[in-house]
Amino acid sequence: MESHGKTHQKEKDDDVSPKPITLSKYSNRVELKTLLERIDGGAGLAGKKVVIGGWVKSSRAVKKDSPPPPPHVAAVASPSSDHTTTNIRCTEMIQSKMNIFKRFFDVLSGGGKTYPIFDKTELAGHKAGSPPEYVFYFSISDGSSVFNLQVIVDSALSTVPATQLMALGTCIVAEGVLRQPMAASSKYVIELEAEKLLHVGTVDPEKYPLSKKQLPLHMLRDFSHFRPRTTTVGSVTRVHSALTLASHTFFQYNGFEYVQVPVITTTGLGEMFRVTTLLGKTVDKEKKKPVKEKDGISIDTVKAAIKEKTKLIDYLKRSDSNREAVVAAVHDLKKTNDLASQLEMKRKPKAGTLVKSEKLDFSKDFFGRDAYLTVSGRFHLESYASALGKVYTFGPRFIADKIDNERHLAEMWNVETEMAFSELDDAMDCADEFFKYLCKYILEKRHEDLKFISKRVDKAITTRLEATASSTLLRVSYTEVISLLQKATTRTFETKPEWGVALTTEHLSYLTDEIYKGPVIIHSYPKATKPFYIRLNEDKNTVAAFDLVVPKIGVVITGSQNEERFEMLDARMGEFAYTREKFEWYLDLRRHGTVKHSGISLSMEHMLLFATGLPDIKDAIPFPRSWGKANN
C-alpha cells in the first residue's frame, strides 16, 4: 500500500514537472496547444526559446516606456491551473456592409482606413529625426487550441507597415523567448517576447471578411473558406475530428475491417443525383424559357428576394430597431416564401403529363449505363461482411431531396457497418455502445473545446454528454410509441399518430424531450415505412429496423437486420415494384452462402449537433451543400 502511494505521488509530481517542448511534426514551430494546454498553462516553460505561427485575433500598440495595455477583450486567456478561462469572447465576425458607424468614421477620416490605436504619421517617422519606438501586443491563434497566445513584438523587428502587421487575420511566424507576463493583472499565464519575425502574411482589411463585429453563424457560411479561423468554428471542427477518430478507434478495437465503398453506384433508392457526361454534348430541340408567374416574376428572382429579406431581419434584430419593424419584416418574408411555394408548385408537371425533353442514351454515357451518387454504403458492405464478418466504412452520402431546413443536407457523412451472423438486437447493442463511446471520447479528448462551445452555444452540452455516456438507453417498439403519442393530452400533432404512419419530427421531439427526456431506441417499424431489404418480422406486419433518437436533433443512428432469405427479399421487391436488373448482384448474395446480418448507420453531422448544441446542421460540416446552396 505504501509503495502504491509513493507511485501515485510520483505520477502527480510528473504531471506538474516541466516537460520538454515538442515541435509540430513536419514543421519547425511549436503548436500552441503544446504550450497552453499543460496543467500549469505553460508557466513552467518560461525562458524557453520557440518558434510559433498563427493568425492575429486582436492587437494593440503602445509607445515604449508606457505601461503595457490590458488584455484585449477579444483575447482568450490561457488556462490557469484548473483550466478555467476568463472573459472568453472570440473574433468571429463578418464585416457588415450595413455598419453605419463604420461609414460615419470613414467619412470623417476622408474615406480611408482607420486604426485608432496610434498616430500613423508619427509611427512612420520624420525625416529630421529617428521614428518613435512602439511595442505591439498580438493575440495569436494557430487553430490547435481554443486558447490564444500573447506575442510581444518590437516595432524595430518588422519591415512591414504597422497598419498591415496589426490587421486582423495577418499571419505571423515569430521566434522568441517564452516569459511570464510582467503585469500582475494580465490574464495570460505565458507570453512570447519575439526576437525575430520570420514571416508576415498580410491582409487587406477592407476586403478581409472577418472583423470584430459579432454576427450569427449562418452569415459565416458565405465565407466558408475563412470561417474556420473563428474560435467557435475551430472548436467545432476539432470536436468533429475527434468524433471521426473515435469512430475508427471503436470499430478497429472491436474487430471490424475498414472497407471503402463507391461514391458512384448503379444501385440505390430514393431521390438520387445522376452522374452523367452527356448533358454537355446534348442540344435541346426546344429551348426552355425561364418560368415566370405572377406578373412576370421568376422563381429565381423571388429566391433572391428571400435571401435579402432574411439578411434584413438579421440586421434589424441586431440593431436597436423597434419591435414593429421586425414584425413587419418577418410578415413580408412570410408572404415572399408563400409566393415562392406557389411558383414551385406551378413549375411541377401535373400528374399524368409528360415533360418534354430530349431522351438521353445512357448506353453512350461514361459508364455505359445509369449511374448515381450513393445514398448508402450498406448495400456494398453486405458483400464484404459475407466474406470478412464485420466491416465498416465512413464517407459522403448524397440525397437529392429538395429540402432546406436545419436538419437536412444534400451531402452528409455517414459511419456505416455491416455484421454477418448478427440480428436486430446485436445491431442495437452496437449502436448503443458506439453512441456512448463517442460521448465519452469527446468529453475526455476535447474537454477545453466543449467548455468553450458550452459558453458560446449551449451551456448544457457537457451535462448532456455525461448523462448520456453513463446511462442505459431505453428500447421501445414503434407500437408502444404510437400508444404513448395517442395518450398525449398536452400536445396536438399535425400528423395524427396512428399505427402505420411514419414518425415525424414533432413526434420524435415530443418523445425525447417530454416523455423519455433523453435518447431512446425505437424498433420494429411497420413494413410500409421502411425499405424493402429490411427483414420481415414473424408478425408479417413489422420489420427489424430501429432508430436511435436524441433530444432536439432527432435520429442520429439508424439500423436494421436485412433480409437474408431469397424468397422473402424477392417478394418484397415485387411489393415495392422495383425492377430486378439493378439488384441482381444483391440477390446473388442470398443465392450463394446467405447469412443473417445486420448493421447501423450514424450521421456524423447529426452526432455533431448533439455534441455541440449547434442549432443548424449547415454549421456542422466544413462546406455545406443543400438545396440551392453550394458555396466554394
Image (cartoon, helix red, strand yellow):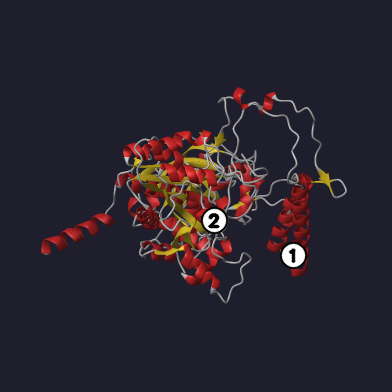
Rendering quarter of residue 337:
bottom right
Query: Which secondary structure lies at badge 1?
Result: helix
- Name the residue rendered at 75%, 44% in the picture: 349
Rendering quarter of residue 505:
bottom right
Judged left or right of residue 46, residue 203 is: right
Badge 2: residue crowd in 10 Å (few <14, some 14–19, many ≥20)? many
The residue at which mark 2 appears reads as: 90
User: In what quadrant of the picture does the C terminus appear?
Assistant: top right
Q: For the residues carrying marks 1 and 2, which lies nearer the camera in this image?
A: 1
- The image position of residue 306, as x and y in percent, is 74, 52
Q: Nearer the viewer, residue 532 or 599?
A: 532
Q: Amino acid at mark 2?
A: Cys
- Name the residue rendered at 72%, 59% in the picture: 313
Q: Give the mark nearer the N terminus: 1 vs 2.
A: 2
Q: Nearer the viewer, residue 608 or 513?
A: 513
**Residue furthest toward the bottom?**
489
Q: Nearer the viewer, residue 544 or 373?
A: 544
- The image position of residue 463, as x and y in percent, is 43, 66
The residue at which mark 1 appears reads as: 326
Residue 422, compared with residue 175, is above or below; it is below
Per the model, the C-alpha gap separating discs 1 and 2 is 27 Å
Q: Nearer the viewer, residue 238 or 186?
A: 238
Please say if the residues under marks 1 and 2 sit with CB atoms less than 8 Å apart. Answer: no
- The image position of residue 189, as x and y in percent, is 41, 57
Q: Amino acid at mark 1?
A: Val
Judged left or right of residue 339, residue 1 is: left
Q: Which mark is residue 228?
A: none
- Name the residue rendered at 41%, 58% in the picture: 79
Residue 128, compared with residue 42, is above or below; it is above
Query: Which secondary structure lies at badge 2?
Result: loop
